[in-house]
Amino acid sequence: MSESLDPATYRELVRRALAEDVATGDVTTEAIVPHDRPGLGVLVAKAPIVLAGLDVARHVFLEVDPDISFQALRNDGDPCENGARLAEVRGRAASLLVAERTALNLLQGLSGIATLTRSYVAAAAGRIRVIDTRKTAPMQRALAKYAVRCGGGFNHRTGLFDGVLIKDNHIRVAGSVAEAVRRVRATTAGAMPVEVETQTLAQVDEAVAAGADVVMLDNMDDSTTAVAIARIAGRARVELSGTMTLERVRRLASSGADDVSVGALTHSAPAADISFEIDL
């Protein structure tokens, strides 16, 4: 993957994470490891993974000790086999031990998102786009969405500011789908593509008639989904959402929908199995 990750997205997060973990010092390492003892640490995949966040891990080690040398052996977005060496880290052994857990927490989390995303992309088999949601850990959204891209997925809106999504509560407040769309179109937000979340066929019809650019079919069963897509008939993009397991994505990939949004990519991805092994 050629895309680079802006350090501004993780610099402060790394500082805060290290402050949380290290605080006044690593009492165990300080008691056991001589300050100037050199060491070599290797990041190793312990299961098949898709790598994401290697630059973030690098920054953790350098934040602890700028004299550390970090050599990446794989790139973000790479599928890595069990036993693959991901990076070599050289420097004071004490510094390596201090940085280890924070670096792993971030690298394992991001690689877990990338790995799960790649599974969904494989299930979609190129017939429907896999996109993420705003269901991310606070203050880690940019990293999570980067990890989704590493896994071959696509990003939905970044936040509330850069995309219109009329949800069920907006519709309740406005009184109807049509009125919610009308109010958006009457503002500067109306210059953006307007997406409407629908839960019934009647709402689908209303959203299309109101001129929605994207219609989200939320938590509809397979048969209702098929009817809804037929009714939309290409007049708007179609996004599938709600209870989108890998098996369901396989089934619906050829439904005629354009996108499938999966909150689990960023809120339920298991951490990738990566270890940090020190060789003195």
Image (cartoon, rainbow, N blue to C red):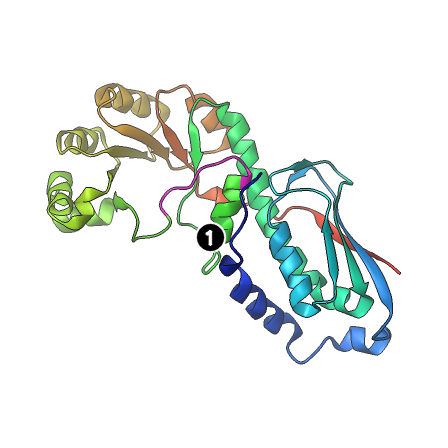
Q: Quadrant of the N terminus?
A: top right
| Figure quadrant of residue 279 | bottom right
Question: For the point 62% across and 48% down, which residue is it?
Answer: 271
Question: For the point 36% across and 24% down, which residue is it?
Answer: 222
Report x, y in % for residue 109: 59, 51
Q: How many marks?
A: 1
Question: For the point 56% across and 32% down, which residue is it?
Answer: 119
Disc 1 secondary structure class? helix
Residue 155 colored magenta? yes
Camera-side residue of 181 and 89: 89
Q: Quadrant of the C terminus?
A: bottom right
Report x, y in % for residue 259: 38, 31
Chief SS of the magenta region: loop
Residue 194 colored magenta? no
Mark 1 highlights which residue? 142
**Image: 113 above or below 103:** above
Camera-side residue of 148 and 89: 89
Q: Residue furthest right?
A: 280
| Figure quadrant of residue 220 | top left
Left or right: where 254 falls relative to 34: left
Amino acid under label 1?
A: Ala
Report x, y in % for residue 127: 44, 22
Left or right: where 152 falls relative to 273: left
Question: For the point 54% across and 63% down, which residue is it?
Answer: 11
Provide the residue span drawn in magenta.
150-157
Report x, y in % for residue 155: 42, 41
Camera-side residue of 261 and 152: 152
Res. 267 visible in picture: no
| Figure quadrant of residue 214 | top left
Left or right: where 193 falls relative to 12: left
